[in-house]
Amino acid sequence: MRMTNTLLAAAMAAVFSVVLPAHAQEKKTLTVYTYESFVAEWGPGPKVKAAFEATCDCKVNFVAVADGVALLTRLKLEGAGAKADVALGLDTNLVKEAIDTGLFEKSGVDTAKLTVPGGYRDDIFVPYDYGHFAVVYDTQTVKNPPKSLKELVEGDPSQKIVIEDPRTSTPGLGLLLWVKSVYGDKAPEAWSQLKKRVLTVTPGWSEAYGMFTKGEVPMVLSYTTSPAYHMVEEKTDRYQAASFEEGHYIQIEVAGLLKNAPNRELAQQFLSFMVTPAFQDEIATTNWMMPAAPTEKPLPEAFDKLAKPAKTFLMDPARVAKNRRAWIDEWLAAMSVN
Amino acid sequence: MLTRAERQRGYAGGGLVFAGIVVFIALAVFALLSFNSGESDRPFFDAYVWRILRFTLLQAGLSTLLSVALALPVALALARQPNFPGRIWIIRLMAVPMGLPVLIGALGLIGIWGRTGVLNSALATIGLSEPVSIYGLSGILIAHVFFNLPLACRLLLAGLERLPPDYWRLSASLGLPARSIFRFVEWPAVKPLLAGITGLVFMLCATSFTLVLVLGGGPAATTLEVAIYQSLRFDFDPGRAISLALLQIAVTATILALMALLPTPKNDSAATGRAARRFDGSDLGMRVWDGTIVILAVAFLCLPLISIALAGIRADLVRLLTSAIFWKAAWTSLWIAFLAGVISLTAATAIINARAAIADARGPGITARGFSTLLASLSSLVLLVPPVVIGTGWFLLLRPYGDVASFAPLLVVMINAMTALPFVMRVMAPAFATHRQRTARQAANLGIFGFARLRLIDLPVLISPIATALSFAMALSLGDLGAVALFGSEELVTLPWLVYSRLGSYRTADADGLAFILAILCLALTVAGTAGHRVGKDGQQ
Amino acid sequence: MTASDPSGIRLQNVGLTLGAQQFRFDCELPAGAITAITGPSGSGKSTLLNLIAGFEMPESGRVMIGKRNVAALHPSERPVSLVFQDNNLFAHLDLFTNIGLGIHPALKLSADDRKRISQALTRVGLGGYEKRTPGTLSGGERQRAAFARALVRQRPVLLLDEPFAALDPGLRQTMAALLLDLHRETGNTIAIVTHDAGEVRQLADHALFIDHGEVTLQAEIEVFLMRRDVPGLTEFLDL
């Protein structure tokens, strides 16, 4: 009985410690909505927070949801009542929808110095990092990696790739747009040919990449920057990204200022801070993406070895928003035929 | 047999739980529906929905058929061989798949059945070059059998062990051959359970999401659950999400109702609740058959688990186990699981008592009988309500009252409790019914009521099914990511959430290690849950 | 009537250990007679019956039924029918099926077999009860059905383990009379475990007294009832 009581008391304590809001701090608090891996112990969050707090005499509070899509959903659900000052972690595919919510306003940040390929400019959202989608392969099993999207599509069907579902994940949508950018109206034909090489379509990046690193499949749709993680953290260059002649589709991650930000000035200060070296220096080896603005520290050597896309594809977000459903239906039709 | 007060308490408790569940779901749905998303231009029942509905039913039907049909011989063999070496551990292991995050289970299965898995590697060494592919319907079926056969098997075994030991003496002395024992003793014991077990497994397979996509081999394999998730995530179209969820509930409920129409003879035999001595299992042929069945089943279950364990051991377990975040997550997971389990058990007890009170009443009216049926179906159909709908709905409801992150833990507990309810009911209801049958008259006669009855009559016997149900519910909730992912905040970190966050940032080895620890935790829970069970032989005349 | 007759039962130096309790049986149950097995609770009466029926395997010694040592045989291979105190019938099967299983274990019944089942039911006073399930019968009716099954099985030996213990005294009398009638018709060998001295007087030709796992007395009923020198027996008979 005593034991049960202690357990119950502990459980209740745990409930209430979370339920009761933290008590007021004297310092101003900047609330940043972001995604989970940004704030993970190895992610950029902790370092960026410390660096910004050192300059602002404020406290940074991260609220993390699963990913960029969940972030947008969260903002839509909360509407004008959101407590957030900054939303960090949307990507170019979500920008149109995010603007349509009417929750954001111009950042006022000078983006002239940005080094993002493809010339993305936006006076509402501030890009802070980017990556190109790429086919990452296992050098131990793939001796002749595809040199173009065409080679990927037309290659040996017994050499498999795992891709993500455009209905449920951003990399999946990225590949869909990449194929559309290269093949245009011929995209359905390309998909029905690529289908023979597709081992399976996973709901998200984690499932696909897990299958890849477990050796189940020799190729996976990921990012040009993925090999950097393995080279830096695991000291292996076994996994490499294939460079495609046609060019690569880009994913740019952005942050924005919310209209109803409780701490507007602080939020603007933070957005400006995001394109300074203090923030950008951390991105490469914590978020495993390319920094969007100049850094002070040089990037690790591994980043020099990464595939450098000769051409960058990026569709107008408005066009994506308008056609996404039709293109997904097209994809479904092509991929579902046996 | 019940006193007036007892019966009234039964009705009241049932009514309360019923109202609680209905309100919990209805408020969420209402909040979602009244949220103006501004886009609903898509015709609802288009060719796409029709196609995924058909696929959902096809794969769920086949998965259920296979899971239950294969679980039956395993349960029969385990019941026939009460002294099978390691039997109790086989039964305990059967709870582990339930507590695994689905993706981890899928990766374990791929480690065995995949293109480069153990099976294909073995086939390759004997010169077969074309690998056996599990991607497609076959992969979905294998995975669903892996997750659901153990569940079905444990519930069937419990039913067989409730038969009076005299039956086995009688069968032996009549010289009934195995086929007759099956036809006249085992099948009649198992048959009334089948509708419930089949329904439970069918619902689990019908709402399967990650497994179907990962192993399905392409978007031809898509379930309604995928479409629901998609419409709330990318499309943000709550109206469509709810329509799809209603379609899923309506179709599944119809199928379950049709199944319930199959005649299920009332089994009024007394039960003992322990593995009885069997005289038909000692014959050599039977031993070989049972041994083969059990070993095959154990291999099927254990190989993927071993592959998960091997991957886990390779991780840096010491670092994982000494990290603060791990302990925080483990603690959060455990108390969420514990509270969810307790709430689920309480609700199940109330439902069982209410139904017993209605059955006990002399000539219950059509309303009372209807309510009893409603309670029973509600307690299983809750499994079909997508957590994403409940979570999003409650998010909207609670938002005006403060920081949603602060309500999140309670919501997660409630959602997990709801999801566990059908499982808890399957474990507790038959045990409670048997117990009531054996003690109701005596207790009523001796005038033992209330707390005394609980302490002297009920708890000593029911503690074992209660422990089993609690360990079931806790394992289920431990492995569940779904509800937590909706609210994820720094404050609310659970073990599956850690596993997924590691997987989501290249740290596969850490994820393997954490998944292994999670599996061990589930096993420990089941050991606690089966502690009261008879371990070996002896103990009977 | 000797022990070499097809249905006489003899236990020769049968030894068995169950948990902490040791059993050693050496006794004879004459063919064609009713032998009562008596003794205090826990003395080993049911164990003796289980040894004959085949639910316990002796560690040593021989269990003879007629000229055959059945010690290693499966219960179904022994020429024995059984009636317990309770649960003699499968509760979910009707009487016809329950009794039919006694004729053919896969229920392959000829028209003649079906007739025999109905006759047996009529014989025990349950005519027309074929479709009833055990749950709808009284305790006495259930035992009658168990007798009907023993009848159709036509085994030379019938073992009864306190068959009337759950019935009220009036009913016991009637049931004992029925048992006696059936015994006279079939001439089978009967062993009946009982707690009831009245039953012993009414039914038995022969009796065993068991104490602490051993047979301390075996005798013709007249002798048995007169003995006053066996510890425990007097208390039992005076009860």
Image (spheres, grey):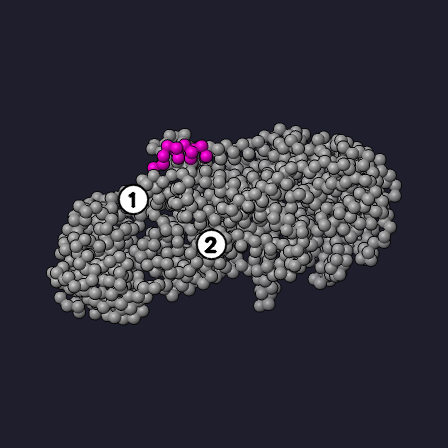
Q: Which residue is found at the position 27% from the left and 71% from the top?
A: C61
Q: Is residue B382 above or below residue B62?
A: above
On whether residue B4 falls in the magenta region, the answer is yes
The answer to which of C52 and A49 lies nearer the viewer is: A49
The answer to which of C140 and B12 lies nearer the viewer is: B12
Q: Residue furthest front?
A: A2
Same subunit: marks 2 and 1: no
* Residue type, numbered disc 1: Gly
Q: In x, y percent, where is residue C55?
A: 30, 61
Which residue does the numbered mark 2 point to in the structure image? B531
* Residue type, numbered disc 2: Ala
The answer to which of B233 and B529 lies nearer the viewer is: B529
Secondary structure beneath label 2:
loop
Magenta region: B1-14
Which residue does the numbered mark 1 point to in the structure image? C135
Quarter-wise, where is residue C238 in the image? bottom left
Circle 1 marks a residue in which chain? C
Q: Which residue is found at the position 26% from the left and 48% from the top?
A: C95
Q: Is residue B31 above or below residue C176?
A: above
On whether residue A279 falls in the magenta region, the answer is no
Does the rendering let one see residue C16? yes
Circle 2 marks a residue in which chain? B
Q: Which residue is found at the position 18% from the left and 53% from the top?
A: C239
* Badge count: 2
Q: Which residue is found at the position 78% from the left and 34% from the top?
A: A263
User: What label does residue B102 carry, if any?
Assistant: none
